[in-house]
Image (cartoon, grey):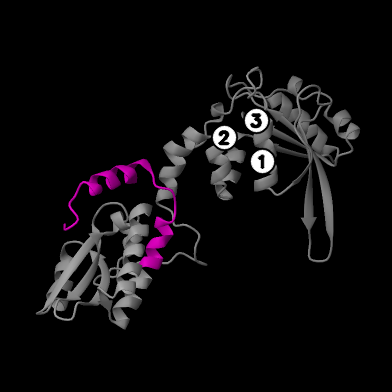
Amino acid sequence: MALLDFKEIPPANTGNGDQDSFELFAREFFSEVLHFEIVSEPNRGADDGKDLIAVEHQFGALSSADFKWLISCKHKAHSGQAVNSVDEENISDRMEQHSVDGFIGFYSTLPSSGLNNKLDAFKKKGRKIEIFSNERIETELIKAKKNGIIKRFFPESYKKELAKTRKNEPSIIFDKYEPLLCEYCGKDLLKEHLHDNKAIIVLLENLNSNEYVDAYACCKGHCDKALTAVKRKNGLIDEWEDISDWVIPSIFIRKEMALLNQLYSGSIKYNKETFEKLKHIILKLSQFALREEDDEQRQRLISLSTLPEWL
């Protein structure tokens, strides 16, 4: 099922100032996703058979070359019709007129069989032809993680589907994904229990010395009870919070600020091992916390704000 609804981009036959939106989207796509250089921008009025002209800079180990593309934009998502051969007339003449090396059809629907046949005939004559229909465009956008472009041109799709999907994927902070393991069973808590309130972060405090002496993450229930039986000795108390709350961006920042304030004021101490363990936990949580809050997290934040501070 498609994640992006191309009907969110206004049709080209409106007169309210949004009629150029699909061409502007194409410009952003080829510039930011495929890293083409745009040499002829979209403009209103007669376009001489082109919407964009872009240069693809091809770099090899020993040489490089530039490839010039004529880009034709056809936005038919609102009617649901395919782009047909009548929509793309005189392709060869248009390519020669603009002195380009290849032709790209940038479409919000699919090309018709008739247009495909016409394009295949050009390919057999050695012409370079590429088609970016809605599915290919979507795939390239998501693969390139261009959420800014998606959010701008597909705001509702971003809210409904992509933000939901993104919530469960780590941000690219480290060279590779870093798991957060349960101290007892070794399960990856970020993959198994990121949003289900079944994993916790635990701090053990020595009341006599006012010092945190251990920090760890674990599954709720059996793992937590087993660790508590071993670790909580006389004079120690434990504090715990759900990992699903810690990855709410606002709470994550608050926790970091609270830690810095504690260290600065000296109100709470951490032994070296505990401090190192807590740093590792925070870094691994950052893969999911350093992002925009979604609606579900905002609601959770509201409910948490109603609780008294001492809980």
Q: Residues within 10 Å of mark 2 (few under 14, many from 20)?
A: many
> Which comes sooner in the sequence, label 2 or label 1?
1
Look at the picture and state if 89 lies above or below 265: above
Image position, residue 159 (x, y; %)? 44, 38
Q: CA distance from mark 3 to mark 1?
A: 10 Å
Q: Amino acid at mark 1?
A: Glu
Query: Mark 2 falls on what kind of element?
Result: helix
Query: Mark 1 falls on what kind of element?
Result: helix
Image position, residue 186 (x, y; %)? 29, 70
Q: Amino acid at mark 2?
A: Phe
Q: What residue lies at 41% left-to-right and 44% top-to-bottom?
A: 164
* 143 or 126, nearer to the observer: 143
Looking at the rendered structure, which numbered label has been put on residue 28?
Answer: 1
Q: Which residues are magenta?
A: 282-311
User: Seen in the image, is 38 located left or right of residue 198?
Assistant: right
Q: Are marks 2 and 1 in contact (CB under 8 Å)?
A: yes
Q: What residue lies at 31% left-to-right and 81% top-to-bottom?
A: 273
* 306 or 295, nearer to the observer: 306
Q: What residue lies at 53% left-to-right and 34% top-to-bottom?
A: 154
Which residue lies under the disc numbered 2?
A: 153
Q: CA distance from mark 2 to mark 1?
A: 10 Å
Q: Amino acid at mark 3?
A: Phe
Which residue lies under the disc numbered 3?
A: 22
Q: Residues within 10 Å of mark 1 (few under 14, many from 20)?
A: some
User: Seen in the image, is 192 located left or right of residue 114?
Assistant: left
> Which comes sooner in the sequence, label 2 or label 3?
3
Image position, residue 190 (x, y; %)? 35, 60
Image position, residue 220 (x, y; %)? 20, 61
